[in-house]
Amino acid sequence: QVQLVESGGGLVQAGGSLRLSCAASGGTFSNYILGWFRQAPGKRREFVAAIKGSGALTYYADSVKGRFTISRDNAKNTVYLQMNKLKPEDTAVYYCAATSRSTIVVAETSYAYWGRGTQVTVSS
């Protein structure tokens, strides 16, 4: 059983930056693909980015490509999401998720473990 706890959310102006963190416990961290998802008010939860266990492979949604960077520190059991050039449409609750699948997947149903989320609000 993997437990995930997100942190780092907050209020930021458009064009600003935030770094989200997700600390994991209860499993062999490097065995899991970690992903970030987000859910804006009134919308479905959507995939943002994911990273393989070794950190060598990453994948991004088109909407954040070039602005967000996912990374992980397996020694600290932590995954990060660096968000730059934030836009009001990035406002959402951001969730960290983990899957034991061997390839990166974007469907939330493929992720078995979830954190509770952290709010990111981008003002215009």
Image: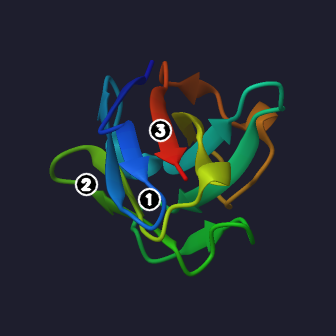
Question: Which percent across, then down, holds residue 24?
Answer: 32, 32
Labelled pair 1, 2 in contact (Cβ < 8 Å): yes
Image: 124 above or below 39: below
Question: Which percent across, then down, holds residue 88?
Answer: 61, 52
Dot 3 amino acid type: Val
Name the residue carrying label 2. Answer: 74
Name the residue carrying label 1. Answer: 53
In the picture, measured across the screen, residue 32 lies left or right of residue 46, that is left
In the picture, measured across the screen, residue 12 lies left or right of residue 52, that is left
Dot 1 amino acid type: Gly
In the picture, measured across the screen, residue 62 lies left or right of residue 14, that is right
Q: What residue lies at 81% left-to-right and 44% top-to-bottom? A: 107
Question: Which percent across, then down, holds residue 3?
Answer: 39, 21
Dot 1 falls on a residue whose secondary structure is loop
Dot 2 amino acid type: Asn
Q: Nearer the viewer, mark 3 or mark 2?
A: 3
Q: Which mark is residue 120?
A: 3
